[in-house]
Amino acid sequence: MKIAVDAMGSDSAPGPEIEGTVRAVAERGVEVILVGDEAKLKPLLEKESYPRERIEIVHAGDVIKMLSFDLVKQGRAGAVVGAGNSGAMMAMSIFNLGRLPGIERPAIIAVLPTIHGRMVALDVGANVECKPIHLAQFALMGSIYARFTLGKENPAVGLLSNGEEEKKGTDLTRDTHAILKGLKLNYIGYVEGSDVYKGKADVLVCDGFTGNVLLKVSESLAEATQVMIREEVDKSIVNKFGMLLALSALRRFKKRVDYAEIGGAPLIGVNGLSIICHGRSTGYAVKNAIFRAHEFVENRINEKIVQELRTAGLEKSPGE
Amino acid sequence: MKIAVDAMGSDSAPGPEIEGTVRAVAERGVEVILVGDEAKLKPLLEKESYPRERIEIVHAGDVIKMLSFDLVKQGRAGAVVGAGNSGAMMAMSIFNLGRLPGIERPAIIAVLPTIHGRMVALDVGANVECKPIHLAQFALMGSIYARFTLGKENPAVGLLSNGEEEKKGTDLTRDTHAILKGLKLNYIGYVEGSDVYKGKADVLVCDGFTGNVLLKVSESLAEATQVMIREEVDKSIVNKFGMLLALSALRRFKKRVDYAEIGGAPLIGVNGLSIICHGRSTGYAVKNAIFRAHEFVENRINEKIVQELRTAGLEKSPGE
């Protein structure tokens, strides 16, 4: 199944999109439909070397995202990869693709680094106010996602709370906790903030407001740490020289935690999949986002979600 | 006004408590009542050199915290400094001291480092479910606290949300936003996670669930970053040598962000004040917590809160 890539979404489009697409089809047996201004894309693609049959251009003027989702709706592509305004991407995904049968609220997944590897957190922004059933569906979707795309066999699912004890949390977390205990998941209960980056949970479930704060605050802290350390290092020649010698270690660390390794944030729970990339995405990030979309489609994750939702009795009743 | 210090609360009590108290009274004109086992404390204090009249011991067997708060109730001390279980400290503070007139919910303050200095976040854990009036009272208390103990003349007050635009947020943040716009505060509107450590707000207001996640996730990320960088550095002799040369810069950075510089988390909104210290507090942290308590009392912050609450028409009606 092909992946549709919005070629014009990133801040420096279509450069990163072209580079990412070319590298993706060259490195793995992926096929991509590039959606965008054909007059611009064609000459750029012609300069590149890659298996020609694996990239198709579909021309679109200013309805690029809309058309990308249409390709999924028509069954010509299995997923959309696109950078730019994440709110717009999300709204268009849900509007154009519709929800997966039984899913009440699609959710945005963030794949975050931990001391021991990576974990999946959801929802990190699609649903600001949630009900317990939404969080339970997130838990199930996240668990399947972690199984197939992070390679965690029996992922530990945790519910983000303000403490580990059952009596902690809000009405929302307590009601969700009660549902999750009854599901066939490797549910480990509440996970508090201090355990998040220890990798205690492979799947961290939360409402979209808290998840957004978690994600953004983490980015903010990482940036501030960098700025402050640089300021201190710049005060001394010896410190600066030391940092130079330590640079390769810092680069390895950065690669471990780099968001571009994942490529984008999947919106899960729609008929298809969309992977929302940062406006500042590099070609490397776009390539990885295409790989994630490809894995998702190849592993038929949506079919598994629908099945397991039914088995768990967690589907929304029709008409609800 | 004296400060009551629970001498037995920390993990290695009474060592840090004695050290912190002795240093505090030696460095500034603070007076402390050490509450704890007199038979243990007296010989330890006798070895130290400090102005004798500034430390008084009040003997208590196993009701140390209770007695410490009693000293505030009796007017013999203005605040309590104590380490250990923060839930217990909080419950006992509220139970023993009672709420400040007009205040509905006391809140825990975290003083956090930013690129430009420090900011105050509240509530970081006392109140898991909040109403708009609670958050508005937090904003007012936090603003006064930042003015007098962080030396910010007209502190910028922000409301933590999932985006800057007014339409973002939850029912709780939107209703709070409406109240805050009408107050005589330097209210700057919503602050999103990505701006937290940029120091955009001097006072960051949130409910205790979100605040707890913010605080704990930040600690978790800082720890994980340290572990991962160390792992990478340990892979190469050159990197290790470089880090050694950069060590003094990292120490300066650590001092900038070190929680011990603040000493503890004030519980604000009670008749008095309690500063809750980490179980693992050092003497240095205890000393700083005593200084914070002293500044709070000397600046008559509670009187100012009661006054400004009344002026703002934000007091809880009696009997409510």
Image (cartoon, coloured by chain):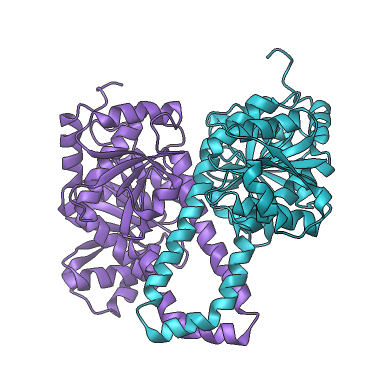
Chain colours: A cyan, B purple
Residue shown at 80%/36% (left/top)?
A184
Res. A271 visible in picture = no
Decide if residue B310 is on the left or right side of residue A33: left
Residue B159 falls in image quadrant: top left
Residue B118: % across, % down: 32, 57
Decide if residue B175 is on the left or right side of residue B226: left
Residue A134: % across, % down: 64, 29
Q: Is residue B94 above or below residue B131?
A: below
Residue B97: % across, % down: 29, 41
Residue A187: % across, % down: 72, 42
- The quarter of the picture where the N terminus of chain A appears is top right
Q: Is residue B157 above or below residue B260?
A: above
Residue shown at 54%/68% (left/top)?
B226
Q: Nearer the viewer, residue A269 or B122?
A: A269
Residue A140 falls in image quadrant: top right
Q: Nearer the viewer, residue B253 or B188?
A: B188
